[in-house]
Image (tube, helix red, strand yellow):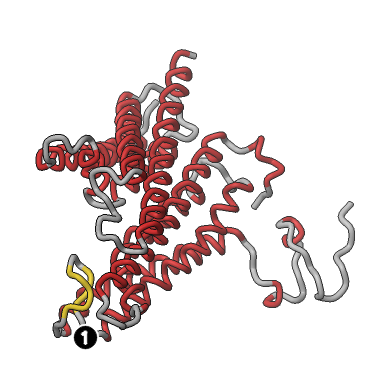
Amino acid sequence: MVGRAMRQRQVLALLLALTALALPVSGAVIFGGVAAPGSGSGFVFLGAVSVQDFVPVLLLVGALGILVTSSAGAAGRTTVGQVAAGVTLLAGAVLAVAHLGTAYHLRAGGAFDLDAGGGSGWVAQRIVAVATMLAAGVLCGAVAIQAAMWMGERKREVLR
Amino acid sequence: MTDGSDEGAIPPWQARLEVVALLLLVTVAVSVVARLVGAYEQAKDARQFGASVDLVQVVRFAGEQAGFIAAGGILVAFLLVAQGPGVAPTSRGRLALRSTTVLGLLVAGIAAFAGIATLVTSEVGGQGLPMGIAGEPSLVDRLSSGVPLLLAAAIAVYVAWCAFSTLGEEPRLLFPEGDGDRDDLGEDSEGHGDPPPPVP
């Protein structure tokens, strides 16, 4: 039996996950449209991670937390929960790829060269920028994996 | 409050959410450091000939950029651990709560410093404008920039306090008589009277 409160929380998780998915996609589309031909995928990755800063990551983690806590101790088929977990998985994968791709391009300079100005501090700036992107990418990947595990567990419970 | 010895009795999703909370805290910490370094580099590039870097402006600019997001991040991390499906956090969750306490106080300090500096300074900075541009913002402008930062600092302090109280680790000197729960937390009792009797 799926309670009303549980369904409401899962719908909320679905909305959070959809927003977390829409923000990087829109950023990638916008930045991909203004990128110069031949500039590679760096601008697409940068656009995906730069829209609304860190907000999509927080939305993603919040969606997973609501999803898991809403179904603690409950059993039964939850279509909304499965959809929310699927969108969380997708958004986590998109954000993870975007952050790790940005880290890769930042590592090599690439489309957005941090040391173009020739300043003496570009090494520190690049190191912390790459570290930020790596940490966020690992976090989003972990969230995607957790969402996939949640989906698998719920399916197994229903089959049982 | 339990220690890590009974993790088998805790639902698996509690431990998984605690891992996500730890990753989130690492991301927030790295992000704050990145904002500080970026603001320092920007201030170094924008300084006049022979002038030193204005560290007040560096912290203010970094606080304006990172204060809100960092406060939100530690709030989400705390909720993941404290409101998870389990009854009590595991040892990993306790580490996350300790990290939340430390990081919350750090973020609160930066955000509060940025808010106060925004309120008292006479220069326009942050919000997409390069630092050092001369300008005289009105009182309303200063309040609209500084008060949200002070509120973010208040959120961070409160989350840090909540995490600390969830840990149940009161300072020893506040309770010199001791209570029975302290041994359960694994705290030592050095230098405060007789050693506790051995637990059978």
Residue B158 as seen in the image, left or right of residue B35 = right
**From this viewpoint, is residue A8 visible?**
no
Tag 1 subunit: B
Does residue B83 lie above or below A32 as drawn?
Answer: below
Locate residue B193 relative to residue A8 in the image: left or right: right
Q: Position of residue A17 (x, y in %)?
A: 29, 38
Q: Which residue is mark 1?
A: B122
| Residue located at (86% from left, 55% from top) | B199
Residue occupying the far top of the picture:
A159
Residue found 21% across the figure and 86% down from its top: B122
The residue drawn where x is 32% and y is 27% is A86
Residue shown at 89% from the left, 51% from the top: B200
Q: Tell me which corner region of the image, top left, top right, bottom left or bottom right, holds residue B191.
A: bottom right
Under circle 1, the secondary element is loop
The amino acid type of the residue labelled 1 equals Ser
Seen from the viewer's position, the closer of residues B104 and B39 is B39
Q: Position of residue B156 (x, y in %)?
A: 42, 65
Foreground pick, B109 / A157:
B109
- Give how far across and how far down residue B29 sits, in percent: 45, 57
Task: Classify B18 as above or below B138.
Answer: above
Q: Is residue A156 visible?
A: yes
> How would you rate the neighbour count of disc 1 (Cα within 10 Å): few for under 14, some for 14-19, many for 20 or more?
some
